[in-house]
Image (tube, rainbow, N blue to C red):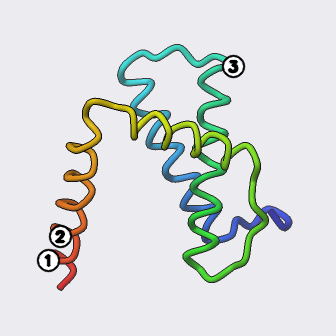
Amino acid sequence: MKGNVLTQSETRVTEVISFILEQYRNEKVIHDIEVASELILVARILHQRFKISNGTQVKEDKSVQIAKNEILKEIKDDEYYGLIKNFIKDYRQFRDKTLS
């Protein structure tokens, strides 16, 4: 962050994290160090994705890569793997129809 001016991707990340925190407050989720670490991971992932989508080359974040690999491994072994794949496919089709 340069000075006090947020980049476009930093602003988007802040908006998403603010939304999540609001939902946590509404559900009375305790804000502890574990929640903070989860939000930091989410923020890193979002920031990386937004920068990539803006055409900015980013250095790979090892913590993000490790977490994604573990999640992908877990999803493939999940009994709902087929449902997850269908959800993603259906969402893409819905998004494409909506944007057209």
Which amino acid type corresponds to the residue marked 1 in the rendered image? Lys
Which amino acid type corresponds to the residue marked 2 in the rendered image? Gln
Residue 46, image quadrant: bottom right
Element carrying mark 1: helix
Q: Which residue is mark 2?
A: 93
**Which quadrant of the figure contains the N terminus?**
bottom right
Element carrying mark 3: helix
Residue at the image position 21 percent from the left and 77 percent from the top: 96
Q: CA distance from mark 1 to mark 3?
A: 41 Å
Q: Which residue is mark 3?
A: 33
Element carrying mark 2: helix
Q: Nearer the viewer, mark 1 or mark 3?
A: 1
Residue at the image position 69 percent from the left and 79 percent from the top: 56
Mark 2 packing: few (<14 Cα in 10 Å), some, or many (20+)? Answer: few
* Residue 69 in picture, x, y percent from top left: 58, 44
Mark 3 packing: few (<14 Cα in 10 Å), some, or many (20+)? Answer: few
Residue at the image position 61 percent from the left and 71 percent from the top: 8
Looking at this view, is 38 or 82 the one in front? 82
Q: Earlier in the sequence, mark 1 or mark 3?
A: 3
Residues at badges 3 and 2 in contact (C-beta under 8 Å)?
no
Residue 32, image quadrant: top right
User: Most extreme residue toward the front, as rendered?
Assistant: 77
Residue at the image position 22 percent from the left and 61 percent from the top: 89
Above or below, comparing residue 8 to residue 42 in the picture: below
Above or below, comparing residue 98 to residue 84 in the picture: below
Q: Which residue is mark 1?
A: 97
Residues at badges 2 and 1 in contact (C-beta under 8 Å)?
yes
Taking the image as shown, residue 90 lies to the left or right of residue 48, namely: left
Say how many tags the image has.
Answer: 3
Residue 79, image quadrant: top left
* Residue 40 in picture, x, y percent from top left: 66, 39
